[in-house]
Image (tube, rainbow, N blue to C red):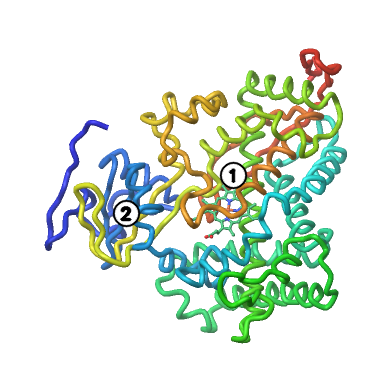
Amino acid sequence: MSEPWIVEERGGYRYPPGLKLNLPLYLSRRFFRIGNPILLFEHLTKTYGRMAHYRVGPSDIVLVNEPDFIREILIVQAQSFIKERTQKRMKILLGEGLITSDGENHKRQRRIAAPAFHRQRIQAYGSIMVERAAAMRDAWREGAEIDVSTEMMRLSLEVVARTLFAQEVTADILSINHEVNAIMKLYNFLIALPRAEDYLHLPIPGLMRFRRARKRLDEVVYRMIAEHRAAGVDRGDLLSMLLRSRDEEQDHAGMSQDPSGLTQEQLRDEVLTIFLAGYETVANALSWTWMLLAQNPEAEAKLHAELDRVLCGRLPTLDDLPKLRYAEMVLAESVRLYPPAWAMGRQATRDITLGPYLLPAKTFFFFSQYIIQRSAEHFPDPLRFDPERFTPERKARRSKFVYFPFGAGSRQCIGEAFAWMEATLVLATIAQRWRLRLIPGQRLEVQPKITLRPKYGIRMLPGLRVVSPCGEASAENPGF
Ligand code: HEM
């Protein structure tokens, strides 16, 4: 980018340009109420460009849109940043799991959890993913309306239940989902409440509901851990793996043998973290993909042709993944436009230099996949759905930090391989049988919560595809 940097000097620091008013005051004057933080980020980006500064109370906040600086924060100067305060509210629910912990604690947990996500280990889950997707496609009926966001949530919940706990979606799993949804409803309220974590014990109805939901959630998770431990066998699931894992590098203690007595809690935090990180993200990625395919029939036809050519009418297996190139490109383009993790944040532990800027310790830095991955500078005609952007040649020409749906550096998503595998196998299994059409006239809007959800769901009609004989061009049901 050729525009010169704008620097504002104050109190010995060099800030990017930004809002003169404290954010709450600014919002009350400009937008009155802002329920959608993406609108704020878009507004700041349009007004200030690569870097924008604002303050909330006494805290400095910088929105970073410059890929080189994101690289500095996540990789080069990563030691000078923590997630701690940006995740404080999440800790209310997730405790000290992988997503929310920092420093040595995080490093140790990552070492312990890594084997559970090893490529070889997760390969065993491929058949579960296909089996669940096949059961779902068999249950759909031609022309009978479905909400794909509900369907994909149910499917990925089933996958995570089977792969994480080696369990069907039993009443226990459904109650986890139910309590989590209840908690999510209160989540925005908790975020809006300053220092919510300090008031959680108060007898306020919203907080009491939150505490009840969290207690029920804990009971279910602890019971599952106890059952696994009592069984004492490796069921091939992630929880068995976590129970067996040892931190080879340090003290040879696994999560199940922590001498501090915090073992149960640690396991609970980890299990809940992986459970939550693992199903809503994938479900949202798939839901947006169905919408995009329906809106882009050319890409959809190419996908169908690939599925017919590679699979010849049989269900996909892990061995097919390297051949389902176009399916992978479709998903990559879908999470470019609708990244399930739509923004990330870090807080500086010391003064930070980024290009011409010098920002004080404790500054919060936010960067949004949603904003950067839709920038015309990095992706010409950015709102166009074009899977060809993800051919190996075009990928190689781009900086990693203009497209980072799974984050980067030492905290890059531990479930990335799992997510690609699940999304590709589910897409292939369902698209092989069904062509989904959008119900006209519905509102299709994003809702940026912890993940990027479709605000009003996505209502679609399934139409049966005529799978072309192996090797021939695919044909659609002409009557649909
Ligand atoms: C399309 C699907 C997914 C997306 C877009 C996604 C995105 C991300 C992102 C951006 C981060 C980094 C956050 C940060 O650094 O602040 C992350 C971390 C994480 N993800 Fe995912 N994720 C997905 C699926 C999964 C799955 C399937 C699992 C587990 C089964 C999972 C488990 C985790 C965990 C445990 C972390 C924390 C890692 C750490 O801090 O060491 N994710 N994910």
For residue 87, above or below residue 376: below
Which image quarter holds the N terminus? top left
Which residue is painted at 54% across and 83% down in the image? 203
In front: label 2 or label 1: 1
Q: Hey, which quadrant is residue 426 in on the image?
A: top right
Is 56 situated left or right of 155 in this image?
Answer: left
- Classify mark 2: residues with Cα within 10 Å, few (<14), some (14-19) or many (20+): some
Q: Which is more N-terminal, label 1 or label 2?
A: 2
> What secondary structure is marked by label 1?
strand
Label 1 beta carbon less than 8 Å to ligand 1: no
Which residue is painted at 81% across and 18% down in the image? 477
Amino acid type assigned to the residue bearing label 1 in the image = Pro
Q: Hey, which quadrant is residue 382 in on the image?
A: top left
Q: Which residue is under mark 2?
A: 27
Is 363 situated left or right of 444 in this image?
Answer: left
For residue 474, above or below residue 284: above
Which residue is painted at 75% across and 51% down in the image? 154
Residue 249, given in percent of the width and then of the height, sits at 57, 70
Quarter holding ligand 1 = bottom right
Residue 187 bears which disc, if any?
Answer: none
Q: Between residue 269 and residue 89, name the one nearer to us.
A: 269
Residue 288, given in percent of the width and then of the height, sits at 61, 38
Q: Which residue is under mark 1?
A: 454
Amino acid type assigned to the residue bearing label 2 in the image = Leu
Residue 357, given in percent of the width and then of the height, sits at 21, 51
Q: CA distance from mark 2 to mark 1?
A: 25 Å
Which image quarter holds the C terminus? top right
> What secondary structure is marked by label 2?
helix
For residue 378, above or below residue 156: above
